[in-house]
Image (cartoon, helix red, strand yellow):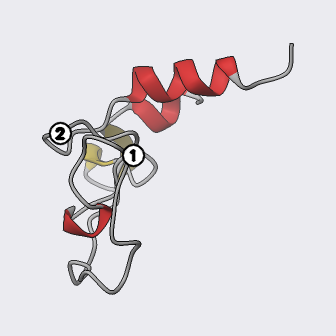
Amino acid sequence: MPPEVNIPTIYIVTPRGISGVPNPLYSYQFHPVPSSTDFPPTGPPGSPPIWSFPNTVRYPNSSGQSQPDLVNRQLQANGPS
């Protein structure tokens, strides 16, 4: 994935100067939090169900934390030769 999607905080120029904000390409906080009927009932093997996360995750581990290095490794392995 492009590096920009793996950075939790981005910095933008505002009228009051530079400000750090959560990167919406890295993670999106759901409003409201999804229920079990909003997503498939199971997640990736070894991880909690996708609907149990309050935000987007990529290749979550058993604690629900994104693993961008594993995502990148899978994308590279499945890309063109």
Relative image position of residue 52 (x, y in whole percent): 19, 66
Q: Which residue is pictured at 26% across the width and 61% down the height?
A: 49
Q: Which label is found at residue 22?
A: none
Q: Which residue is pictured at 34% across the width and 43% down the height?
A: 45
- How crowded pointer 2 is (Cα within 10 Å; few <14, some 14-19, many 20+) is rated as few
Amino acid carrying mark 1 in the image: Val
Residue in the foreground of this view, choosing between 46 and 14: 46
For marks 1 and 2, give the one nearer the viewer: 2
Residue in the foreground of this view, choosing between 11 and 58: 58
Q: Which of the two labelled residues, at mark 1 and mark 2, occupies the earlier sequence position?
A: 1
In this view, 65 is above or below 76: below
Cα distance in 3D space between marks 1 and 2: 37 Å
Relative image position of residue 22 (x, y in whole percent): 28, 50
Amino acid carrying mark 2 in the image: Ser
For mark 2, give the secondary structure: loop
Q: Which label is found at residue 13?
A: 1
Number of numbered discs: 2
Q: Which residue is pictured at 17% across the width and 39% down the height?
A: 62
In this view, 46 is above or below 78: below
Relative image position of residue 60 (x, y in whole percent): 30, 41
Left or right placement of residue 78 versus residue 32 in this view: right
**For the residues bearing labels 1 and 2, Cβ distance under 8 angstroms:** no
Instruction: In the displayed orientation, state which residue is furthest to the left.
Output: 63
Q: Quadrant of the C terminus?
A: top right
Q: Which label is found at residue 62?
A: 2
Residue in the foreground of this view, choosing between 13 and 71: 71
Relative image position of residue 57 (x, y in whole percent): 34, 49
Q: Which residue is pictured at 57% across the width and 25% down the height?
A: 74
